[in-house]
Image (tube, rainbow, N blue to C red):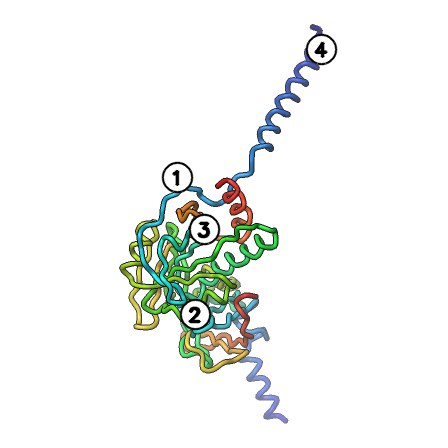
Amino acid sequence: MGPKNFIVAIVLAIALATGIFAAVRFNTPAAPSSAFVLPAPTPLPEFSLIDQFGNAVTADTFKNHWSLVFFGFTHCPDICPATLQILAAARGELEAAGQVLLPRIVLVSVDPERDKPELMGKYVDYFGDDNLGVTGSLTELRKLTSGLGIYFEKQVGDANDYSVDHSAAVLLINPDGQFHALFSAPHSTENYVHDIPLIAADH
Amino acid sequence: MRYCFFCATLFLAACGTESRPPLAADDVVVTAPMPGLKMSAAYMSLTNHSDQTMRVSRVTSPHYESVELHETTMENGVARMRALPELKISAGATVTLQRGAKHLMLSRPSGVRETVTLQFFDGDDLVLAVDATLEPRNN
């Protein structure tokens, strides 16, 4: 092999390696970019809360459709409406893109003291139809949140002017009623629009 | 005539050499209250055009029972909202009030309005008064 052929061989080898690398790199199936998908989805804990119509909400309520569950409270002027707006916008975009199994948006109140069903109804309706507002007793709420690793803590304040610290994550519940994936804050519409079809297709 | 000239001179002296206000607000957004609720948030950027550090310690409005400086923080995945004692704005600096960060919480509006006035104080000095149109949250 002459020096010229040797150079040609090297160039071809590099080209081949580049091609293989590119094929591997770019043909990898698209994966969720921001959601943390649980290796094994876990069933929801036993709990009994109520929705904005006064109907019972239990683990079974989450079966047969995807749900995006956010824990917040209505007397929260900043981050709660911003998060629900992002979820509503994502749902709208998924619907426009023809996604058949649209996730239902669920707000679980971490402030059941002030968040009565009627107020929850007005609040969640503001972000679109079919949204679920969940409230109830603190004891039952704790069963749900502690089972899902969701933190909340009422802060000291006036009778009507207190805040509640709460986990900012959004949980994706699958149609088997299992905690399937978690979206951490900061939230963005694009992340949900990108990840939900991939997660649903993989389920 | 001489009296008026004297007044004008006093006025100019009071304003200093610059005609713009010491504190300026841009991109002001005041959200409309959510259905059934009596609270809103206000967002804007505040620029200190003076040559001294400004400490906005109080914001008032004739249109709300209470206006508070707040900050939403995110730590270990937990969102918290806390009252801020003051907003410190260095000379020439801009502080941004935005979603998920520093903001104003406006509580218990007096009636339904389309525009509201916010007044910013450094100690007892009124450093800015701004009128804003309420913006629906889903805009």
Does dot 3 land on a helix, a strand or a loop?
loop
Q: Which of marks 3 and 4 is nearer the N terminus?
A: 4
Three-letter code for the amino acid on which mark 4 is drawn: Asn
Three-letter code for the amino acid on which mark 2 is drawn: Met
Disc nearest the viewer among 3 and 1: 3
CA distance for labels 3 and 4: 64 Å
> Does mark 3 fall on the same chain as mark 2?
no
Q: Mark 2 points at which residue?
A: B105
Q: Quadrant of the N terminus of chain A?
A: top right
Say if residue B95 shows up in the picture: no
Q: Residue furthest top?
A: A1
Q: Name the residue under label 3.
A: A64
Residue B75 badge: none
Q: Badge 1 local density, few (<14 within 10 Å), some, or many (20+)?
A: few
Q: Mark 4 lies on which chain?
A: A
- CB atoms at circles 2 and 3 under 8 Å apart? no
Q: Badge 3 local density, few (<14 within 10 Å), some, or many (20+)?
A: few
Residue A5 badge: 4
Q: Residue A126, percent across and down?
A: 50, 67
CA distance for labels 1 and 2: 41 Å
Q: Badge 4 local density, few (<14 within 10 Å), some, or many (20+)?
A: few
Q: Residue B51, percent across and down?
A: 51, 67
Q: Residue A13, percent across and down?
A: 64, 17
Disc nearest the viewer among 1 and 2: 1
Residue A40 badge: 1
Three-letter code for the amino acid on which mark 1 is drawn: Ala
Q: In this view, does B91 lie to the left or right of A60?
A: right
- Relative to B92, say whether A197 is above or below: above
Residue at horizontal 45 percent and vertical 70 percent from the top: A122
